[in-house]
Image (cartoon, rainbow, N blue to C red):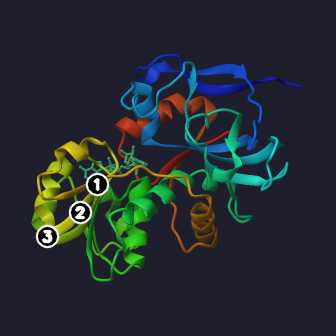
């Protein structure tokens, strides 16, 4: 039996060259865990933030550290106490930390969802983090009421694409910032007003906003306070600095997503039956992982990039 596996890992924080494709020991399923044979994994902004060491406080690492936070695959083995899954089941989800960019990963069964039959693994791997984080961040400041005005920054991105759809369904009037090239895509998801962030100032178009979802951060956050109603809130996903940068008397909330297997199962079923659009912009092979992680940082993109382990 083969006791080693291929993985994309870092041995120290660094730039794109820090990511190494290496042979390491295959993990075992512990108490309450299943061992998943990974077939596809989703690429996220958190990958290069971890690589660079930007989130070393939130994600303290032991090196070498295998990157990757979400995947889809098949149950290879079950650990003691596992009740929900059997060998051969197709599963998808976050891995509960890092480790998805390996041929095998041991994951607590509680955070995994069954992959819908009609959803292939590459498409399934694009869903877990972004869909659940978009849903949770949209509702983080309280329930959305019909007629509320919601501004979504980074609407063409992984989280943004889902958030536009969820906000529209909840009856909100949706303002969305995106590059001009992505305007039709974002409008097709349900945005009422699409603002080209490169040529237009969102402050001139979006006013009296009840909720800002900030999936971009930096100066976009700074400029967003002025578009809020007096009771409006900004939910930030990019950095906990939002807490220190919230002006007195305003509502600025830092969001951290939580695994929710039942929510993911429901959202994945919607993706499978076509009622929730999940855009896959790029599929890469395992050997392309280091470059694809770097492209998430440097290159304009909409939707999600997935690594297909069969390539
Ligand atoms: N706190 C949490 O629990 C949590 C969970 C998930 C994700 N996140 C974070 O949330 C953020 C969004 O994640 P994601 O996966 O959706 O990222 P993503 O797929 O990289 O999307 C970001 C989008 O923002 C767009 N953008 C860049 N600058 C912009 C600007 N000035 N105005 C408007 N849009 C702009 C990009 O468009 P272009 O293509 O034109 O550059 C891209 O489409 C990341 O920082 C990620 O790390 C946090």
Alpha carbon distance from label 2 to label 1: 7 Å
- At label 2, counting other C-alpha atoms closer than 10 Å, the crowd grade (few under 14, some 14-19, many 20 or more) is many
Q: Which marked residue is nearer to the observer: mark 1 or mark 3?
A: 1
In the depicted view, which residue is nearer to us: 176 or 311?
176
Q: Earlier in the sequence, mark 2 or mark 1?
A: 2
* Residue 206 in view: no
CB atoms at circles 2 and 1 under 8 Å apart? yes
Task: Confirm whether residue 39 shows in the render.
Answer: yes
Give the residue number, with chain letter if any, for mark 1.
253
Q: Quadrant of residue 48?
A: top left
Number of dots carrying numbers = 3
Q: At 20% across and 50% down in the image, what residue appears?
A: 221
Is tag 1's residue or tag 3's residue first in the polypeptide sequence?
Answer: 3
Residue 102, x across and y down, in percent: 66, 32
Say which quarter of the image contains residue 26. top right
Question: Residue 310: percent from the left, percent from the top?
Answer: 71, 40
Q: Residue 243 carries which label?
A: none
Image vertical order of residue 242 relative to residue 187, above or below: above
Which of 182 and 149 lies nearest the eye of the viewer? Answer: 149
Residue 116 as seen in the image, left or right of residue 51: right
SS type, badge 1: strand
Q: Mark 3 points at which residue?
A: 207
Element marked by disc 3: loop
Q: Determine which of the numbered discs, if any, sits on residue 233 in the image.
A: 2
Where 264 sits versus 294, above or below? Answer: below
| Image position, residue 183 (x, y; %) | 32, 64
């Amino acid at each position: 039996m083969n006791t080693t596996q291929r993985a994309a890992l870092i041995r120290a924080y660094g730039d794109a060259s820090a990511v190494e494709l290496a042979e390491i020991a295959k993990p075992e399923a512990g108490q309450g865990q299943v061992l998943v044979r990974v077939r596809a994994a989703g690429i996220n902004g958190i990958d290069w933030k971890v690589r660079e060491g930007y989130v070393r406080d939130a994600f303290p690492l032991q090196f070498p550290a295998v990157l990757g936070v979400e995947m889809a695959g098949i149950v290879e083995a079950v650990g003691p106490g596992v009740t929900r899954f059997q060998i051969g089941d197709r599963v998808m989800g976050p891995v509960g930390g890092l480790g998805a960019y390996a041929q095998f990963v041991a994951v607590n069964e509680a955070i995994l969802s069954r992959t819908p039959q009609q959803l292939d693994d590459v498409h399934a791997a694009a869903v877990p983090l972004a869909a659940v984080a978009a849903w949770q961040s949209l509702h983080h400041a309280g329930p959305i009421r019909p007629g509320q005005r919601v501004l979504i920054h980074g609407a063409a991105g992984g989280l943004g694409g889902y958030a536009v759809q969820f906000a529209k369904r909840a009856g909100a009037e949706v303002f969305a910032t995106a590059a001009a090239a992505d305007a039709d895509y974002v409008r097709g998801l349900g945005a009422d007003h699409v603002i080209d962030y490169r040529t237009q100032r969102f402050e001139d178009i979006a006013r009296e906003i009840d909720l800002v979802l900030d999936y971009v951060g930096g100066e976009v956050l700074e400029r967003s306070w002025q578009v809020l109603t007096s009771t409006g809130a900004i939910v930030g996903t990019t950095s906990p600095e939002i807490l220190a940068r919230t002006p007195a008397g305003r509502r600025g909330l830092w969001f951290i997503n939580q695994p929710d297997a039942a929510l993911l199962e429901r959202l994945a079923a919607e993706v499978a039956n076509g009622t929730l659009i999940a855009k896959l912009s790029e599929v890469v092979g395992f050997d392309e992982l280091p470059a694809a992680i770097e492209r998430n940082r440097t290159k304009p993109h909409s939707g999600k990039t997935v690594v297909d382990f069969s390539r």
